[in-house]
Amino acid sequence: MIVVGVDGSRTGLEAAGWAAAEARLRQAPLTVAHAVPKWVCEGAVRYAEVAQWMRDGAETVLTAACERARRVWPEVRLDGVLLPGDPRSALVKAAEEAELLVVGSRGIGGVRGLLVGSVAYGVAAHAPSDVVLIHDPPPSPHGEIVAGTDGSPGAGRALDFAFTEAELRGARLHVLRAWAWPQPGGFEPASRESEQDTLRALKESLAGHRERHPGVHVVAEVVHGHPVEVLKEASARADLLVVGSRGHGQLAGMLIGSISQALLHHAPCPLAVVRR
């Protein structure tokens, strides 16, 4: 099952359309969810007329999002549900039964100037499922998926996700490892010999994935530069950017790593944040 959170915003509708296309690829049911304050869903409330007005508005949001999903996939197995409570906690709970949670990058209540809203950040950090964050989907498919890896356990799970997506879409997979991390002597690129060793290790790490997905065309590359900038540039014409939720060097207790955090704000295409 795929869950998509909507709130009446443009990016929410884009998320509903993207989620329907993904559900079609996976032949999975789709749940379109909209959160309202808990008291609105209760039978006996002090402000019954206000509650009814808010429920009517919520149903309008759900109807619009469901219609958008059905335009993408008319045969979609679709449920529209109202979730009681704060949108972040309600969507995180809904994701417990889902394989994927999809949300727009900024909702209708987003603060001007913020590149990613509090709900999007909250679910990316806390959801138990993989999360896809929708900014502006490309108007037409480019036929490429970009995946970032650093060799960590989380990156391995992200590669599983990326290979599967590339196979479902018939897309090329571009796997990148950024090389210029801070070194003891300063922020310097490594020697060519070390770079070749890293590329060789990268290709070896892909061997098992290639065996499970023999039809996927894979390009592996080691690139000098900071991971955020490398992945931003590489995914400028991609259909999806895939990263792990946490990689090497992250502080204990962090729910989402610094690279993933930065890409939540700056990814130029839909971003998948994959759990371990």
Image (spheres, rainbow, N blue to C red):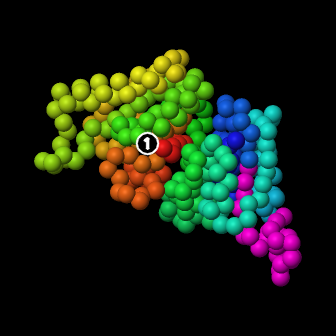
Q: Where, by quadrant of the figure, is residue 167 drawn?
A: top right
Q: Is residue 49 magenta?
A: yes
Residue at position x 79%, y 51% in the image: 80
According to the picture, the residue beneath numbered tag 1 turns out to be: 154
In this image, 141 relative to 248: left or right? right
Residue 58 against residue 32 in the figure, above or below: below
Magenta stretch? 32-56
In this picture, residue 5 sits left or right of residue 170: right
Residue at 86% from the left image edge and 72% from the top image edge:
43
Q: Label 1: state its secondary structure.
A: helix
> Tag 1: residue type?
Gly
Q: Quadrant of the N terminus?
A: top right
Number of numbered tags placed on the structure image: 1
Residue 224 in the image, given as x and y percentages of width and height: 27, 37
Q: Specify the farthest residue to the bottom.
A: 46
Nearer-the-camera pick, 215 or 135: 215
Residue 133 versus residue 29 in the image, above or below: below
Q: Position of residue 132 (x, y in %)?
A: 57, 45
Q: Residue at x 55, y 60 (%)?
A: 122
Residue 135 shown in magenta: no
